[in-house]
Image (cartoon, rainbow, N blue to C red):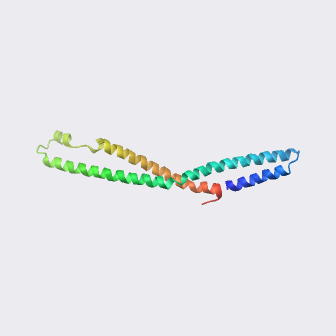
Amino acid sequence: MLILLSVIFVGLTVIFLKIISDDDLSIIGVALFGICSFICIIAMLIVGRNLVNGNVIQDKIEMYKSENAEIDSQICEIVEGYKTYEKETFENISNKSANVLVELYPDLKSNELVQKQMEIYMNNKKKVVSLQEDLINQKPLRWWLYFGG
């Protein structure tokens, strides 16, 4: 659409330049269509840049999803390790007082590695959603640029 409008406005500008006379209407027509041509060309450049950036969105989504899958498996390994450790700890405790259990029971939430991985996981998830929105927004941009779908 922007390409078509640019061609029309540039064509009308050229036509008005060819038939220009000293009357104010011709000068106003050249100025008006020239400005419209300029605006359409700037809009084409902006929309085109957004479409070019959109070509790598799917690759970024796949990268974040694979990173999240890796983090997910690492967290599962850590949780399994904790479960094994806890099982061994509770089996070896002879005194089952609450104070001893609290001292020996490792709190998974306080593990810095797990917290950092969960933070990265959640940030990646937000980025994937944002990138998927950008991917959805590519369709209207294509339409505005060249009636693409």
User: Could you tell me which quadrant the N terminus lies in?
Assistant: bottom right
36 on left or right of 128: right
Outermost residue to the left:
94
**Which x, y percent locates residue 40?**
69, 49
Identity of the residue drawn at 23% across and 50% down: 83
Identity of the residue drawn at 28% across and 52% down: 77
Identity of the residue drawn at 79% across and 51% down: 14
**Which x, y percent locates residue 21?**
88, 47
112 on left or right of 98: right
Nearer-the-camera pick, 117 or 14: 14
Nearer-the-camera pick, 108 or 33: 33
**Which x, y percent locates residue 130?**
49, 50
User: Could you tell me which quadrant the C terminus lies in?
Assistant: bottom right
93 on left or right of 2: left
Outermost residue to the right:
22
Q: Residue 98 is drawn in which quadrant?
A: top left
Image mark count: 0
**Which x, y percent locates residue 33?**
77, 48
